[in-house]
Image (spheres, grey):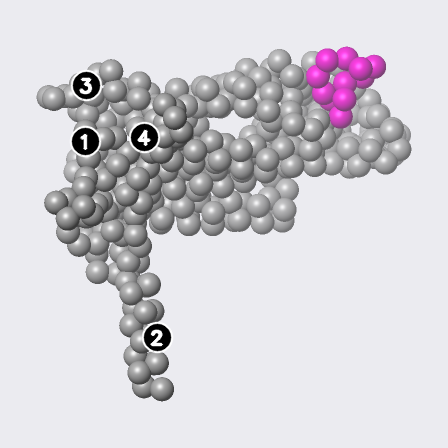
Amino acid sequence: MNLAAELTQGLSSQVLAWIPSPSVAVWKVGPIPIRAYALCIILGIIAAAVISDYRMRRRGAPRWAVLDIAVYAVPFGIIGGRIYHVITSPEAYFGEGGEPIKALYIWEGGLGIWGAIALGALGAWLACKQMGLPLALVADAMAVGIPVGQAIGRLGNWFNNELYGGPTTAPWGLEVHKMDPGNQGHALIGPDGKAVLLEGLYQPTFLYELVWDLLVAVFVLLADRRFKFGRGRAFALYVMAYTVGRGVIETIRTDEANHFFGVRLNVWTSIVVFLGALIFFLLRKGPQEFVIPAVDGGKGFQVVTEAQYDEFTASGTRPESTGESPGESEVDDDDPPAEDSASEPGKQEEEQKG
């Protein structure tokens, strides 16, 4: 019994004493390299799209409309993420010993979430304009899928042995390999034939952010179900929640970064973005937007309230149109009712151009 207990305790301590890191992040299928970082980003995009599609369809959008939006948003987001990364970490590309051409090597890692969100939103707006969907509805639908996608994407940093924090003795400390500069995506191999590890264990900041992203997704989902946020407020809630965690995690990371007044640039960015999202959340008012097909099969969609959407799906009864362009009107519960609203039972508040 004592021997078995000692063996069990010893095995448990070995399992819980650290988190291993992969020594290989690139595999080759013939001449084609398969990169773990790229796979994680792709899987994250797929997860975000599936979740967003489900939430959009519950509010009247056609099935897989999210794919038409992704055609614009994803390339814009990747370009924006890379631009932000290069601007905020220029030394690796334009500093002493840097290689400017590597600013284009997205597969080696380095996508800034702030640039990805900014340009990705521009791409989504362009797609929504073409489709006649309100951007606010799409943004609120994506407010749960995006953090889930981010969480999956963070696994790419784990494969790349990057973006870890300082030394730690915590049982969840991370082993980090010394990567081979001459064999990208592979750990350096020592004389004993084994992958070389950095001395000690390190804070797994990729894991902290992964867990935080999933918590943010659950928080936004539950809050949105309870309060039925509309007009972009669910997305603003996601931004606020994410920036709180990101700002804290940035103080733990030890990778090279530009500093202002002794504080990492991304911490300042988190503060500014949080305040912007908070102001938007407090000032923006109105119920959730739902959409129904445009009148007589026209292009785009008509924005309606939840009650109007439920009535339309149940009986086909269409609310009166305000004459605004499909996809550009938004319903605001602060608007005064129309003059004849008292004589028309069930009529909702007047739609106001958003």
Secondary structure under the numbered disc 4 in the rendered image: loop
Say the numbered circle drawn on residue 99: 3
Q: Secondary structure at mark 2?
A: helix
Write down the region rendered in magenta.
292-302
How far apart are labels 1 and 3 at the CA level?
A: 13 Å
**Which of the labelled discs sits on residue 181, or is there none?**
1
User: Residue 266 colored magenta?
Assistant: no
Task: Please indicate whether residue 31 sits to the left or right of residue 337 in the image.
Answer: left
Q: Amino acid at mark 4?
A: Gly
The CA distance from mark 2 to mark 3 is 51 Å
Q: Which residue matches tag 2?
A: 8
Task: Measure how far apart labels 2 and 1 are at the Cα level.
Answer: 40 Å
Q: Residues within 10 Å of mark 3 (few under 14, many from 20)?
A: few
Q: Is residue 180 visible?
A: yes
x and y percentages locating residue 277 in the rendered image: 45, 34
The residue carrying mark 4 is 109
Where residue 269 appears, as percent x and y from the top left, is 32, 33
